[in-house]
Amino acid sequence: MSARLLERARTAGIGDIAELVLAKQRLSREDGVRLYKADLHVVGALANHMRERLHGDLAYFNVNQHVNYTNICNKLCRFCAFQRLPNQVGAYWMTPEQVADKITAQLGEPVTEVHMVAGIHPKLEYGYYLDILRAAKRARPSIHVKAFTMVELDQIAKKAKKPLSEVLPELIAAGLGSVPGGGAEVFSERVRAETYHLKISGDQWLETARTVHRAGLKSNCTMLHGHIETIEERVDHLDRLRLLQDETGGFQTYIPLSFHPDHSEMADVPGPTALDELRELAIGRLMLDNIPHIKAYWILMDVAVAQLALSYGADDVDGTVVEEKIYHEAGATTPQHVKRAELVQWIRDAGRIPVERDTLYNVVWSDDPSLARVGENAPVAN
Amino acid sequence: MAVFRGRTGATQSEQDNARGWFYLLWCLYSSAMISEPSSGSSEVIASTHATPSGWRAPISTAVARTSAGHEVQRISERVEDGVRISPAEALVLHDFADISTLGRLADLVRRRKHPSDAVTYIVDRNLNPTNVCITDCGFCAFYRRPKHAESYVLTRDEIHAKFDELVLLDGRQVLMQGGHHPYLKTDWWCELFADLRPRYPNVNLHALSAPELDHLAKLDKRPVEHVIRDLKAAGLGSVPGAGAEILVERVRKIIAPKKTSTERWLEVHRRVHEAGLRSSATMMFAHVETAAERVEHLDRVRTLQDETGGFTAFACWTMQKDGVPEEEIYPDKATPGVYLRVQALSRIYLDNVENIQTSYVTQGLKMAQITLRHGCNDFGGTMMEENVVSAAGCFHLSPIDKIERQITRAGFTPLRRNSWYGIVDERFRGDRRPTTREEAATHTDVGVTR
């Protein structure tokens, strides 16, 4: 099998890259740039090879819900359609009781995770963040709270008026279980200056992630692609994630986020197409050799892309997602949630074995218990 | 290459022989390879009419370790070598090849047929002159029985207005089909075509699917070839491939018992081709058919194409069941992954059909773009309005610039075509033929993108 793959890669002009992949060697930045220009089927096949080496046929999902506790934000990122100014029509923030209500409303569903992210509302005090964590855990003690992007954590530490390393233990005590990967955008200072200059820089994002990992928390990582960033800037972003991962090992999953233009200030930028998204996932898999999981976030790419992505390097499709708001404000036409049985069917139809995981990749349910045993950690080969 | 008209196909006994072999191979194959317990799929496919084999997508690395994996490899090499695959081999690919393999092979076949980087589409519109139908297909949400409050027949003025809108966009085709109206006979259609043809010389009348032609022949009580002859004289330019559903009688008896039979559907297209008109072929799948029946459908199309060479293109789509009369007999709507597999397989199998159309109306723009690297070389029509599929809760229509962007971002050059896959795009400098139905009738290499 690998001989044929190598032959195809040679024909496509990336034989040397295929040799590195097959030998489990790291790809250089230059290799990464070339992958953006090589034939998509071959790049996909290489990523699939790596994905099957790490995860076999397993494909992960979870049963989760989203709570976006406020859409009020002072970062004014030009690519965002979710943000509102404090007095703008549609602006909202949830009290801890309202956060708890969102979670209580799902008690009839087998939800294992709440994904809680929001805008940077300058008036929310440190105690509020602790309160919403406690409210979530009170509403459903078994739930894993994956909350606060690096950008929010930076804000929380500012509000707490102490270093993040001292804040994190308090957040953990209040119920924080892990940290999502959003807010990384593209680390390039050029892109930041043009599109999100009020947000923390790439260096600050990485430093925050380092602190999070040192506090013993796992996190995800992301890249927002398909707007004004160059190929080189994407590769630089991936390389910087990879270097931090070498140091901390704290990233569980990399999630490429597709820019959705509708209703944002950048509505004239069309955003990535399906084949662009597949390539981004495949290159993510190939470059990030030290991050175990690659997620095809179905809600922003569409079911079709997420299914095929499971053969383009991805091994996770995210979850049932009750009430997605951020991408739907930006014109996403996918449903705002999906039934667990449908997710299972998507994965089966994509030729993979569905495995329900919790946030930390412990197996909750497995379509093939001989390959992934319930209660154990998701098996990742090397 | 398919030579249109003049080439005699296989004799009936040869065809029977081939079908006999197909079933023999299928029986051997099914006993050897279908060992999967069916219990695992029962929760997924609730309906008793769901694919009886309990089809599950092949699991990539698991299959690679079995004899089926070797068989997939062997068949892949045959496709790579440009060898025609048998129905039994197609079934092996259907059941055991992973999507990467199917996609790669379909892409290969597509590039062989269309070495240039063009992806075509046609500026057209749908026009359903009537929704009155007496066929009562349980999968159709569009039709109304005669005298139903919502039944309609468009007036000539309404039809003209729709044509006028299309002409403003430099449209080249009106896909005109409707129900099987019990009183609208061939004369009505001939009169309509004779009026439209000189009035809109650039707009081809791509009209009346095989079941409708069959229906007209019944109303007239005369052979369908006479109906086709008259319609052609009045201005009919080409025939759409609708109503094929699945060309297997067991399936048709369940989903469309009153509709044209398999043999008759094929016979009508044979007559259309013999009359010097081109047509297209379609498949509506993921309802009550088995995997083997999907392959059998493809085989029926390929066999007729060997005989006549008259099909310009093939398109397939999945059953859209929301709101159809017999919704309860159908399984849940197939996921996009199922569509993509069968679509890729159709490109691999139909080695004598030049063009494969994507179905963005049912699958959406994102999947449509994906199919351009999984066997499709044509984006279909821009369809200013679409009534039939949209009546079944599925509606994706896109402005032309969005379609072109999908094509461009997939690495291809978008070009506008006519109904016979000749190019009508000022950006194109090469051979634009065929430009008329007469040229198309003698044109052996349909599609300039070769």
Image: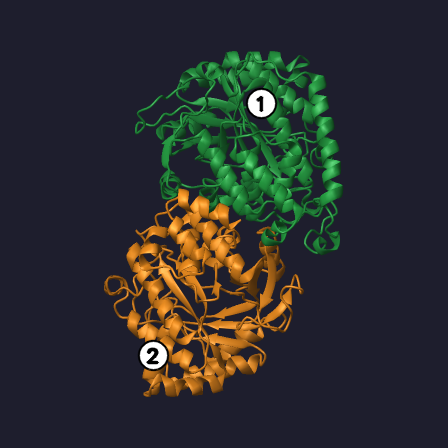
Display colour for chain A = orange
- Which residue is at the front of the view, A146 or B132? A146
Q: Quadrant of residue B308?
A: top right
Label 1 crowd (10 A; few <14 / some 14-19 / many >=20): many
Looking at the image, is mark 1 or mark 2 nearer the viewer? 1
Q: Is residue A223 left or right of residue B30?
A: left
Q: Secondary structure at mark 1?
A: helix
Residue positioned 74% across, 43% down in the render = B32
Q: Is residue B431 left or right of residue A250?
A: left
> Mark 2 belongs to which subunit?
A
Position in image of residue B271 (x %, y %): 60, 16
Disc 1 marks which amino acid? Gln
What residue would you read off at disc 2? A155
- Parent chain of label 1: B
Depicted B251 relative to depicted A212: above or below: above
In the rendered view, does A290 fall on the left or right side of B145? left
Q: Which residue is mark 1?
A: B305
What residue is rendered at 40% in x and 79% in y? A212
Q: CA distance from mark 1 to mark 2?
A: 67 Å
B407 or B77, nearer to the observer:
B77
Q: Is residue A329 visible?
A: no
Chain B shade: green
User: Label for residue B95?
Assistant: none
Q: Position of residue B255 (x, y in %)?
A: 70, 37
Q: Position of residue A207 (x, y in %)?
A: 33, 76
Q: Nearer the viewer, residue B205 or A21?
A: A21
Amino acid at circle 2: Gln
Tag 2, which secondary structure?
helix
The picture quadrant where one finds residue B87 is top right
